[in-house]
Image (tube, rainbow, N blue to C red):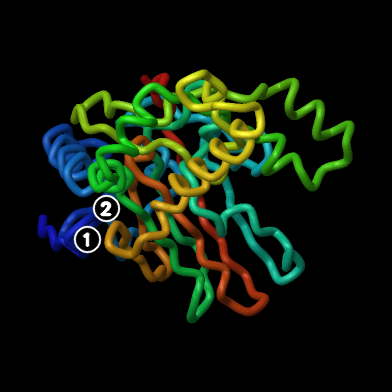
Amino acid sequence: MQVEQLTCAIGAEISGINLADAARDEQLFAEIRQLLLRHKVLFLRDQDISRADHVAFARRFGELEDHPVAGSDPDHPGLVRIYKSPEQPNDRYENAWHTDATWRDIPPMGCVLRCVECPPVGGDTMWANMALAYEMLPDEVKAKIANLRARHSIEASFGAAMPIEKRLALKAQFPDAEHPVVRTHPETGEKVLFVNAFTTHFSNFHTPEHVRYGQDFSMGGSDLLRYLIGQAYIPEYQVRWRWKPNSVAIWDNRSTQHYAVMDYPPCHRKMERAGIIGDKPF
């Protein structure tokens, strides 16, 4: 196995292995898991593997989850099909910096994404190191957000374009989740900035230490949240990956955000993702 670091902040490309083998080789899988903790996102080319092998490899990390909006493969539960077509020009839920499914009380710990078909040019995906984003925050900001918590909503994102009845039913199924603004990675102990495009507001900002008058609540909280969400936009924290068929990305969802760049003309882009059930952020 060869490992090539892609940026100083995040990402490494692995070659010389096959994920179908890693699904059955305990030592090889353990090496990949350690590399994932170190680099936060791993990339592989030429992984012409079956859906069953894709699922088997991802399940080595833990049990898989379905997505309530995107469809799963009927023969492989947990393998979510993210298929874009020329008939979906306005399907733009991915081109925002986000951590997958933080609208769940227990977001995924990670994902294994494989490219089935992609545009000849364009359609890259970017990842950002949110542990580094937290580390580089000014000390006064770290002090201010140390005990803050925030709400994350599927209703305000995936549900926003739905008819009101479906939107409210989606919210009833997945009420807004509340997470710490700074979570602790359960395996590395790193502090991670944990707000993203699914985050709507702080849930405990309106306190005497933050608010002099009621008007401060809206202005101060929303300005701070925009500043924190914007940390993922900083290029020094990012890596960008150009897809080819049978390319795979494996990422730690607890310490990263990602962004699917929609810069390609109307065409097919078919990705298949296995999301691994995680743990409650603390």
Under mark 1, the amino acid is Glu
Under mark 2, the amino acid is Leu
Which residue lies at the image location 45% right of the left edge and 22% below the top edge? 209
Of 243 and 55, nearer the camera is 243
The answer to whether residue 20 shows anywhere in this view is: no
How far across and how far down the image is residue 270, in percent? 56, 61
Which residue does the numbered mark 2 point to in the structure image? 42
The answer to whether residue 109 shows anywhere in this view is: yes
Of 279 and 220, nearer the camera is 220
Which residue does the numbered mark 1 point to in the structure image? 13
Of 210 and 270, nearer the camera is 210
How far across and how far down the image is residue 254, in percent? 36, 35
Q: Residue furthest front?
A: 212
Q: Quadrant of residue 29?
A: top left
How far across and how far down the image is residue 163, in percent? 88, 41
Q: Quadrant of residue 157?
A: top right
Which residue lies at the image location 24% right of the left edge and 53% below the top edge? 18
Q: Quadrant of residue 59?
A: top left
What is the secondary structure assignment of the residue under circle 1? strand
Q: Is residue 25 above or below residue 177?
A: below
Indicate the quadrant containing the C terminus: top left, top right, bottom left or bottom right: top left
Callouts 2 and 1 close, C-beta under 8 Å: yes
In the figure, is residue 201 to the left or right of 11? right
